[in-house]
Amino acid sequence: MSGNGNAAATAEEDTPKMRVIRVGTRKSQLARIQTDSVVATLKALYPGLQFEIIAMSTTGDKILDTALSKIGEKSLFTKELEHALERNEVDLVVHSLKDLPTVLPPGFTIGAVCKRESPYDAVVFHPKFVGKTLETLPEKSVVGTSSLRRAAQLQRKFPHLEFRNIRGNLNTRLRKLDELQEFSAIILAAAGLQRMGWQNRVGQILHPEECMYAVGQGALGVEVRAKDQDILDLVGVLHDPETLLRCIAERSFLRFLSSSLTLYLTGGVWSLNGAETMQDTMQTTIHVPVQHEDGPEDDPQLVGITARNIPRQPQLAAENLGISLATLLLNKGAKNILDVARQLNEAH
């Protein structure tokens, strides 16, 4: 019997252990659902690997009494997860792509952009206003949103409404809507509601002519260490080509707007007696190049994304589209609008 026992033990010791891939995520229910969907796809593609999900809280999850635009942190929902990546505590992180800045910290890249769900914003109404639209809500109705982008566009479209900040995860915001009697409606991303299985709460979908959606909204991004070619190869199969190109164009547009400087130069000449003079002013918009964007083997990233399994030319075309649109708007005075908006936001 002892011989059989030894043989069994030896066989068990010789069985190779499955490699474990550690996946980082936020702790919210929506973040876990999104991460579970990515991990399920990876498990189907790589049955010989084991995946462990590690959840953690981020700055954006902890600070709930301040509007996101007031916190002054560019990586509200990503910094702690990136620290875990840097310390090699996780191998990849699943994000909502709209939460990822267009310039990532050195050493990181988006290794996969997954197929996009609905990019649109959705309106969820208080039970007593079910059947209404934003247009038919009573005068001075309060609509909750955590997004300046939404509030600015919708205030112009629906001037009879008041827009007020609302924070918290989806569960918290829906509870505030239903229980506090403060809000007539709230604005949320349609994709998040779909992933949570709450499509029945959607009372209105906002199309781009009413409210343009956020850059990358509806897509998931998988962030990895930029030089970790093994993990890059593993997650690269998740790239959805159409979503990738759309999001490169959108992120390129946002980055160029954010990293451009407008220079004004005024010059003049005068005759010796000052009787004759000529003065004029010219302006130009200068793009400030981003540093630290090397991927594996120094392949340049595009707006923080590495996609070596997708042809390069379409990616460059998408990036150029975003730059061209940003340049067009900057030449029409967009920088002034953005600067004034930032100053007003900081003052309040």
Image (tube, helix red, strand yellow):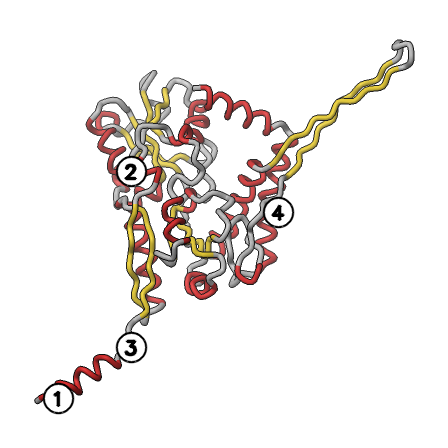
Res 121 → quadrant: top left
In the picture, the disc for residue 66 is none
Q: Earlier in the sequence, mark 1 or mark 2?
A: 1
Q: In what element is the residue under mark 2?
A: loop
Question: Label 4's element?
Answer: helix
Q: Position of residue 183 (x, y in %)?
A: 28, 24
Residue at the disc numbered 3: 16
Q: Are marks 1 and 3 in contact (CB under 8 Å)?
A: no
The image shows residue 257, relative to residue 86, as above or below, that is above
Decide: few, some or many residues near mark 2? Use Cα within 10 Å; few <14, some 14-19, many ≥20.
some
Task: Kindly report which numbered mark, 3 or 2, lies closer to the viewer in this rendering.
Answer: 3
Q: Name the residue: 15% across, 86% down.
A: 6
Q: Nearer the viewer, residue 99 or 162?
A: 99
Q: Which label sits in the foreground, 4 or 1?
A: 1
| Residue drawn at x 30%, y 43% as measured from the top left | 57
Q: Amino acid at mark 2?
A: Asn
Cα separation between marks 1 and 3: 21 Å
Distance Cα–Cα, label 1 vs label 2: 56 Å
Of the image marks 4 and 3, the number of the one nearer the N terminus? 3
Against 252, is 270 above or below? above
Q: Amino acid at mark 3?
A: Pro
Judge from the rendering whether residue 283 lies leftward or rightward of residue 241; answer left or right: right
